[in-house]
Image (spheres, coloured by chain):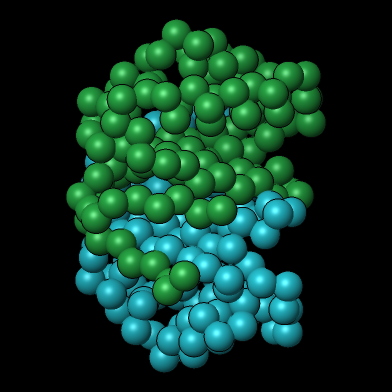
Chain colours: A cyan, B green
Amino acid sequence: MLSNTPQPPYYAAIFTSQRTEEDGDYELTAIRMVELAAEQPGYLGVDSARGVDGTGITVSYWTSLEAIAAWKTNAEHLLAQAQGQAKWYERYSVRIARVERAYASAI
Amino acid sequence: MLSNTPQPPYYAAIFTSQRTEEDGDYELTAIRMVELAAEQPGYLGVDSARGVDGTGITVSYWTSLEAIAAWKTNAEHLLAQAQGQAKWYERYSVRIARVERAYASAI
C-alpha cells in the first residue's frame, strides 16, 4: 500500500537506516511509531520498506516543517529515537525535504 | 550502505513502488539503472530498499532539478520506465523534492 498524498507542495522526512542484528522490541516499536505519527497534526502519510540486507527507508509526509519539528520532539517518539540510536541502528540519516512535484501511475 | 550526500540544499527523487510478481529482467534492469544513474551529471547518490511485501522505495539525490529532468529523459532509462509501467510495477509514485536539512548518525 503506497501513500496517497495531496498535491504539492508538502514536506517529506526521509529516514534511511541500516539495522543492527539486535531485535528486542524493534518491530513493536516500529509499528507503534507508524500509528503514533498518523495521530499527529499535519501528518499526510508514510511509506516504508526494509530489504533483507538490513537497509531501510521510511518516508513520512507532512503539511509543514512545523509539523515535522513537533513530531521529532514528541515524547514517545524521542524515547524510540534514543532506543534506535542505542540498539537498533548501525547507521542512519534523516533528510527534510520540500516536495515540489509529484506524479503517480494510474490506479 | 547508505549514501553520503553533501550539505543541503540538493534535490531528491523519491520513487515508491509496489511490484507485480512478474520478474523477467527486473533485477538486471534495476542494477543497470543504478549504475547508469551514477554516470549522469549532477548525480549525488542513491538509497534503495524493497521489503518482502513488494513495497520498494528508491531515493536518488541530485544537484539540481535540471539533473533530475535529464535523468528522467535518458534514453535507456525511458526504456526501463516503459518496461516498469508495463510489467514490473502494480503501482508507483514519483516525488521530486528539495532537501533543506539533513543530519546523520556518527559513523
Q: Is residue A39 visible?
A: yes
Residue A59 image point, x, y percent = 46, 56
Q: Nearer the viewer, residue B107 or B36?
A: B107
User: Would you place residue B61 above or below residue A58 in this image?
Assistant: above
In the picture, which quadrant includes the C terminus of chain A?
top right
User: Would you place residue B13 above or below residue B26 in this image?
Assistant: below
Count of labels in the image? 0
- State the residue at coordinates (71%, 28%): B27
Q: Nearer the viewer, residue B106 or B94?
A: B106
User: Would you place residue A2 above or below residue A12 in this image?
Assistant: above
Q: Nearer the viewer, residue B77 or B41?
A: B41
Residue A89 image point, x, y percent = 58, 73
Relative side of A92 to A100, left or right = right
Which quadrant holds residue B60? top left
Relative side of A91 to B84, left or right = left
Find the residue positioned furthest to the front.
Answer: B107
Q: Nearer the viewer, residue B17 or B34?
A: B34
- State the residue at coordinates (43%, 35%): B94
Residue B88 image point, x, y percent = 68, 25
- State the residue at coordinates (31%, 37%): B62
